[in-house]
Amino acid sequence: MITTLVQVALGGALGASSRYLTGVVIARNFGMGKFPLGIITVNVLGSFLMGVITIILVRTNLTQFNALVAVGFLGGFTTFSSFSLETITLIERGETGLAALYVVLSVGLSLGALFGGIALARAAFP
């Protein structure tokens, strides 16, 4: 358990650092426009890498690195990749209704929770 936790923590630190550096590189090369190009880049790239890495780890019998790479690194790089993997897993299991519900609830409730947190913080700290 401790070894797994260390792998997640190490991977998460590397992933979060990579997300930050990716945003810096994109901002320097494309400027800081109105559209969040850095965030969408890490979300799409992270989702793509989650697909590639999970298959490679399973097919090469290296699933012991899942905590380090998929959960830690990609989770730190973007939590959107984990969301994407869970959605596709539901679809592949034939649970398309649950997948759609998961997408709608995840996005809707997360945006609602963010809005609620902003409203609460603004009220508490005017």
Image (cartoon, grey):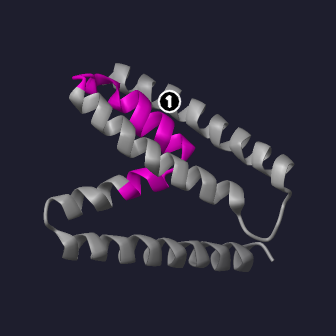
Q: Quadrant of residue 114?
A: bottom right
Which portion, as a residue range, is magenta? 60-84
Whether the magenta-drawn stretch holds residue 82 is answered as: yes
Residue drawn at (58%, 78%), measured in percent from left and top? 116
Residue drawn at (66%, 80%), measured in percent from left and top? 119
Element class at badge 1: helix
Q: Quadrant of residue 21?
A: top right
Residue type of the residue flagged with mark 1: Gly
Q: Position of residue 126 (x, y in %)?
A: 81, 77
Q: Position of residue 64 (x, y in %)?
A: 28, 23
Q: Position of residue 53 (x, y in %)?
A: 37, 35
Judge from the rendering whether residue 58 lies leftward or rightward of residue 126; answer left or right.
Answer: left
Quick one: quadrant of the N terminus? top left
Q: Is 121 located above or below residue 88 in the figure?
A: below
* Residue closer to the observer: 92 or 66: 92
Residue drawn at (22%, 64%), measured in percent from left and top? 91
